[in-house]
Amino acid sequence: MFILTNKLLIDKEQNLVKNEAMSKQKAKTDNQKNLILGIETSCDETGLALVEKSPKQSPVIKRSLIYSQEKIHQKTGGVVPEIAARKQVEKIFPLLNKLVEEELEGSLEKIKAVAVSHGPGLVGSLLVGVNLAKTLSFGLDKPLVKVNHIKAHLYAGFLTEEEIELPAIGLIASGGHTLLVLIKSHDKIKLLGSTKDDAAGEAFDKVAKLLKLGYPGGPAIEKISQGTKKSSFNLPRPLIDKGLDFSFSGLKTAVLTRVKKIGRNNLSDQEQVELAYEFQEAVVEVLAKKLFKACKNTKAKTAIIGGGVTANKRLKEKIKEEGLTAKLVTPRIDLATDNGAMIGARASFLFEKGLTVDWRKLEVKPNLSI
Ligand code: KG4
Ligand code: ZN
């Protein structure tokens, strides 16, 4: 980091004269495409992306690079924060170098702004991305955009080349969060409901562990449930008819009770499949119903979903089965989980509105809410 900062300081001095000339051209360049570097390191994915946006158009990915630590954390059945942070440090510079060499002819000068996810997330992991972003902003004299990781999940949808009409309802279902929001505009996002206990993805991970299906639980449960159409188990649909809040911990306990009754080591393959299937049905039904209800209440014309759980095919089917009239915007499957492109995408709208921060004032916010 020190060597990089020194190099950037030299570049910065050389750029001062150039920048003065450039500011005179600002009015002209404001109508041009903005190229944003998006940085994501809030948990166990290292994501770096270049996202381009023209005025009045949806952002487009120029390149997105992701390193996932999934295999490392499979051994422990969940993310170990210290290991996650150390791997972030190890991986971020090779990824940055690759991006700069392969997409920017070796120079970061072409980017308009640096954007970073500053929370919520694991403090050690977040610090890696935030420190890199601050260093680049200072050294290259580029504006810095701070991005809320939860909100960013919805902006993967804006990368699908769709025309997105606001106001929209947003459903975020990830490993750390499950909530419904109303996106009135890019800087006015209102919380409508959230989970009172576990997040949907967290419940998938815990239930998969109970059923000995490994980590991460969501893809494992989805895979084993494929082809199944019914189950002899009946699990609750928590809070299904009550408002827009969620609760998934009771559902996980209900699976635990069934498993204990049978005996964890006596669970047959059939029982394992049927429990996984019924659990997935319960989660997707609750998510789909509440999304439908939020759209109906607000008369929103668009519904955008995002976060790891929205990679689930059954969830998308169930939303359609609910008869949603709002246009459904789903993220590309590889952009449902954490990535730098969603950070760049959200930042591209914030940057257009002039919402930048001074690098000296940016701090990590592990408990940031919506
Ligand atoms: O959005 P994400 O990558 O990270 C957070 O910000 O939390 O979400 C990860 C979560 C994990 O809990 C994982 O089990 C879940 O998303 N997930 C899925 C699927 N793919 C990932 N859940 C259900 N079905 C999937 N296909
Ligand atoms: Zn996430």
Image (tube, rainbow, N blue to C red):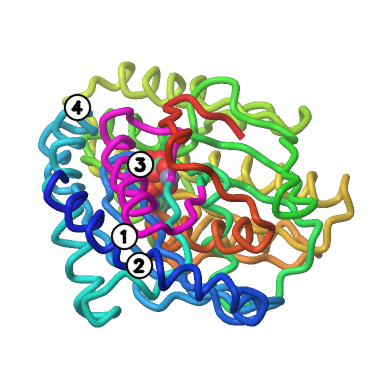
Q: Disc 4 residue type?
A: Asn
Q: Is residue 136 left or right of residue 80?
A: right
Give the label on residue 130, or none. 3
> In 3D space, how far apart are the residues under numbered discs 4 and 2 (Cα atoms)?
69 Å
Label 4 element class: loop
Label 2 element class: helix
Residue drawn 63% across the image and 40% down it: 286
> In 3D space, how far apart are the residues under numbered discs 4 and 3 (Cα atoms)?
48 Å
Give the label on residue 12, or none. 1
Crowding near pointer 3: few (<14 within 10 Å), some, many (20+)? many
Residue identifier under label 4: 266
Comparing marks 4 and 2, which lies closer to the viewer?
Answer: 2
Label 3 element class: helix
Comparing marks 4 and 3, which lies closer to the viewer?
Answer: 3
Comparing marks 1 and 3, which lies closer to the viewer?
Answer: 1
Q: Nearer the viewer, residue 101 or 64?
A: 101
> In 3D space, how far apart are the residues under numbered discs 1 and 4 (Cα atoms)?
66 Å
**In the rendered structure, which disc, 1 or 3, sits on the residue that comes first in sequence?**
1
